[in-house]
Amino acid sequence: MSDIPAVEAHGLGKVFNADSANRVDALVDIDLTIVPGEFVSLIGPSGCGKSTLLRLFADLIEPTSGSLTVNGKTAHQARLDQDYGMAFQQSGLFEWRSVERNIELPLELKGWDKAKRQQRSAEMLELVKLGDFAKHMPWQLSGGMQQRVAIARSLAAHPQLLLMDEPFGALDEMTREHMQAELLRICATMHTTVVFVTHSIPEAVYLADRVVVMSPRPGRIVDIVDVSLGRERDELTREATTFFEKVTEVREALRGIEMSNQARGIEDR
Amino acid sequence: MNATRVRSTASAVWPPVLAGALFLGAWQLWVKVYDIQPFVIPSPTSIVQSFFDDFDLVWKASLVTGTNAFIGLVLGAVFGFLIAVLTNRFKIVSEIINPLAVTIAAVPAAVIVGVLNNMYSLDSQIGRRIMVTLAVFFIVFVQVAKGLRQNDATQMELMRSYAATPRQVLGKVRLPNTMPFFFTAIRNAAPVAVIIALVSEYFGGTQDGLGSKISGTLNGSNKALGFAYVLGGSIVGLLFFVGANLLEYYVVPWQRRRPSR
Amino acid sequence: MADASGAHPRRSRLRRALMFPLAFVLVASLWEFYKAIGPAKGGSILGIRVLPRTDDQSMSHVWDMWSRLWQPEVRGNSTRIISVVAQATFYSLRVSLLAFVLGSALGIGLAVLMARFRIAERALMPHLVISQTVPIIVLAPLIAALMAFASRDLASKTWIAAVILGVFLSFFPVALGTLRGLQATPPAALELMDSLASPWWKTLTKLRFPAAVPYLAPALRLAGAAAVVGVVVAEISLGVRSGVGRLILSYGQEASTDPPKLYAAVFGAAALGLIMASLVVAVDRTLMRNRPQENS
């Protein structure tokens, strides 16, 4: 594991529509350092900028202030070098491609030859336990399985960093919990650093080493909760007292935002 | 499993078949009971009779019209697709084409054939083929342009995260997403192609296609033959329609799972 | 798709309005350009004779087309072509409107029937689809013969046959669109009406119809164009005396001696189509005035 931080942000900020009446301070003064191999959750109410922050890391949008390095490079270079993989709430699978061809997509774009692509794609399918479904079409799979394919795709090029924007948001609770366990297993195998945006407090705590709590208007970090639950997590972890304590800690950090917003007379959107 | 499939196919089939049979039966009865002369309205049986008796006549005429329709369909689809892609790339093209499209779409199709026939020699089928091409072009153009404008947000973000070039995005995401629109348009345009090919024959030129034969014989006394030609025309139209459907079914199989547009 | 980038809607509307005549000027210039450089007797590309003839007989000059409009129809007669064409266009417009209204009514009625009785839908739908592949247009002479057979009086009123043809062509898109709309009512809303003990007919008028309007509106556009096509083609095949279709036919026959006349008639038909299209668009806008706009 290298010493270069996976993500390093100082004073990072993003403003939309700076010169007009629609000005939005999506993010203000974000300081965050993520070490390689870490699993970090971003959580907060609507409008706190967590998705925006993720997209800044991904170089899908550009910051208006502050500095940001991803894997020791500019975010732009990191994207060109394909140092990260990304997963969204919609699986975004191409319905005209089979499962294995979907996973091959990033490798195609990188110019890999066919044999290598197929081999890597088969590998990833085994990793997400969908080896039997290589030739299936996306619509033949359930939502959870589609997301697994999306995750396999995001890791196909073995990136060191994985960025995820509420990937389990559209799944039911039981599938979600199962997918969370799977995700931890996969990331442990591949030693990936993960930044995971979520709305769900138990999900944030169960998955992460640290939970970054954010608040809106303007978007900023209000607290970072260390989840000292150890790296070996299973179903029993969800019932452990320490788990509930951490969940409560995050919840109170979030409630603190709510109350201070109310004190300021701001309505929840 | 097979029994239920048979049963459900049967239940989908018998109502229209029954309705059709009732209609034909009523027609036959009406002609017989009121002793309608065959030069006014022929009976269904006489039509079928004429169809088989004069099959080679119907076949020859169908070939002429069918060829025109087919060439126009293919050319119209190809041009419609290409120009739509061009339009998407260069906005100025769409600004010029749109007013023209609106006007030509409003003009009763086939009227332009009169002008076209004037520009070519009397024995040429080109005018009619151009007409069909035009009609099909606009149907395909509108649909493909619409398909190109629709962009799945997640897929676009994904491609951006891959630092994909615009060419890669076009080839790997936008064009495949447009395919369902393209083939739906072809499916809609197929019967139109046949009808326009038919109607184009009203405006002079060679008189050996279905359209001219139909109007010629229906104006005369051999109405059964006229209807046999009409039957031939419907079969051609149906063939085109079924062909387009099959094309769509096999080329864009993922479309089967989508709710219909 | 309007964006919040501050684009001026007025400026873009102006630009679009300018584009219209510009497009036609462009086409006219291309026409004249080809006429200037193209082969007089027509030519071939790759062995196929696709290039039209460019002599004045086959392709009139654009300015000849314009000037011919203002000249008398026949030498010695004082009515100008433009008024003849305008009258014929107006006549056909009235016939088309009638066909459109009747066809839409028929289409809506059929759709209601098919929505109410599923057996009707299953029995009729395939036939409706097939009917669109049948060249109904060509049955115009037959309808005229039927009418003549039915009564001596009807025989002379060939315009009725044109209306019938227009109805045949326009009812289908309306029936299809309305049926889809009636079947697309949100189930939650239907359950609400049920809980209010609303009979089927009331549910139809208060819920299903209004909910179906977004599907009906585009169908009406298609129906308008279809009505015009049906009427004009019927006029041509039946020789309906006062219609623009008949004009195209007769001027087309005179094209060898007096080519620009044909173009005048075609422009008339084009105007007919455009007027009908504008009317239908206006109807569309009125029906959809309080609905969320979907850019298509």
Image (tube, coloured by chain):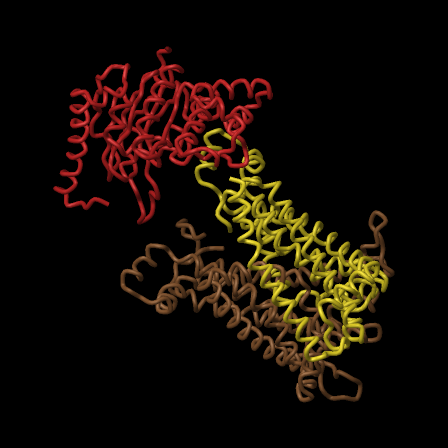
Q: Residue furthest right?
A: C41
Q: How many marks?
A: 0
Q: Colour of chain C?
A: brown
The chain drawn in yellow is B
The chain drawn in red is A
**As drawn, is B87 to the left or to the right of C139?**
left
**As drawn, is C183 to the left or to the right of B12?**
left
Q: Quadrant of residue B249?
A: top right
Q: Residue furthest left?
A: A263
Q: Residue at x 58, y 45 (%)?
A: B89
Q: Residue at x 58, y 68 (%)?
A: C170
Residue C164 vs B252, above or below: the answer is below
The percent coordinates of residue A249 (x first, y second) are 16, 26
Q: Quadrant of residue A160?
A: top left
Q: Is residue C36 visible?
A: no
Residue C294 vs B152, above or below: the answer is below
Residue placed most toward the observer, B112 or A245: A245
The percent coordinates of residue C99 (x first, y second) are 58, 75
Q: Quadrant of residue B165?
A: top right
Residue placed most toward the observer, C219 or C156: C156
Q: Residue at x 30, y 21 (%)?
A: A33
Residue C110 vs B159, above or below: the answer is below
Q: Is residue B89 visible?
A: yes
The percent coordinates of residue B153 (x first, y second) are 44, 40
Q: Residue at x 76, y 60 (%)?
A: B128
Residue placed most toward the observer, C188 or A125: C188
Residue C195 vs A136, above or below: the answer is below
The percent coordinates of residue C284 (x first, y second) are 47, 66
